[in-house]
Amino acid sequence: MSGRIVVAGASLGGLRAAEQLRAAGWTGSVTVIGDEPHPPYNRPPLSKEVLAGKAAFASLAFTPKASATDVEWRLGTRIVSARLADRTVELDDGAVLGYDGLVVATGMRPRRLDCPGPVAGRHTVRTIDDAQVLRGGLTRPGVRVVVVGAGFIGCEVAATAVGLGAAEVTVVDPLPLPMAAPLGELLARELRARHEQRGVRFVLGVGVAGFEGGEHVTGVVLSDGSVLPADVVVESVGSVANIEWLDGNGLDLSDGVLTDGHLRAGGRPEVVAVGDVARFPNARYDGVPRRVEHWSVPTDSAKHAAKVLVGGDTGLRPFTPLPTFWSDQHDFRLQSFGAPGLGLGDVRVLDGDLSGDVLVGYHRDGLLVGVVALGGPSAARAAARYRAELLKQPALTPQGAPS
């Protein structure tokens, strides 16, 4: 229990990893390295409460558990490379740190559009600094906002911009419906209608070809040749894993960091990955390795990975989380348990109706694999009842047979 564990990444996954290492009995040193200057903070409010001016940074910051107060934090510092064979990482200040264990928790960064045109006026929402700069643009009188990407973050930003009184809010996406990929057509149509009723305009089935303007963006050029006037553009077109520093170590980095069922990377017992950068098999469903960008995953994966790193996997069942997320948009909330995206071929209303509070179930091979509640507290309570059912279902082996 002596030596050093390096935690690469100082967001929620890194914080929880540090806490869980102490809970698992690690008494050696723990060094957490993060490229942001801020201590760990809660990111989901960035596209909602922070943009709306309803939450200050102080209210977002996490307080480490008492057991982890002796952790060393190196903030505003980036890991530039790793030599897993030598068990070392190199920092951007030239320092080289040796380790006995390594936790990969470097997370994701926003994908950017590779289109011609000015950069000023184009925003992403990933950090507190991003959100604060974007809020300054959204609160200008008469602002015209174009959100590129009709996923959860894009729709949350659009809803917040409407609430701030933006003159125009338009969401652009090459897909035919917003949030259809994770939720399916049934809920996607209802969500579009609810957004349109509250003032959001959708331009769907087209992509972005470029941007107009001199030093600052003034318009978004679409793939059909039309132009949307814009003072502020928000790019919400997916994310990219922060894994370049791991190049050259024989790991599968094609989509995050591929791990085994115990979150170990590359067959190395001293290297684990946690949070949305980890691509792990989940035998609760089918054993296919996937990344999961849900708020619950950093905490759940950190708890499991810390046990594996400190004590090995003897007697420990593989990591089989039940993913959970929520999304607040306008005056309604989406709450999800399970993996709705695996059951898009069989979607049914389980409770309520689409015109009000509704609970939708997602099934695969006749089994419920996910539920999504849309609306207020009654829908959320219905979803919570089905959560227990989802947890009771038997896990599957990678071949798909009950274990």
Image (cartoon, rainbow, N blue to C red):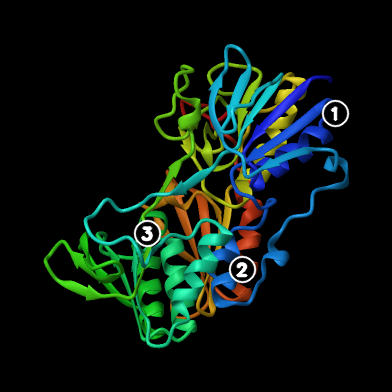
Gap between marks 3 and 1 measured at Cα: 44 Å
- Name the secondary structure under disc 1: loop
Please state if 104 lies on the left or on the right of 164 as rendered: right
Residue at 88% over, 46% down: 66
Is residue 352 positioned above or below 387 on the image? below
Earlier residue among tags 3 and 1: 1
Is residue 402 positioned above or below 185 on the image? above
Residue at label 2?
Answer: 380
Gap between marks 1 and 2 measured at Cα: 37 Å
Labels 1, 2: front one = 1
Is residue 302 positioned above or below 116 on the image? above
Q: Quadrant of residue 103?
A: top right
Q: Residues within 10 Å of mark 1 (few under 14, many from 20)?
A: few
Give the percent coordinates (x, y) of residue 18: 75, 37
Residue at label 1?
Answer: 25
Give the percent coordinates (x, y) of residue 168: 34, 82
Q: In the image, what residue type sits under mark 1?
A: Gly
Residue at 29% over, 75% down: 230
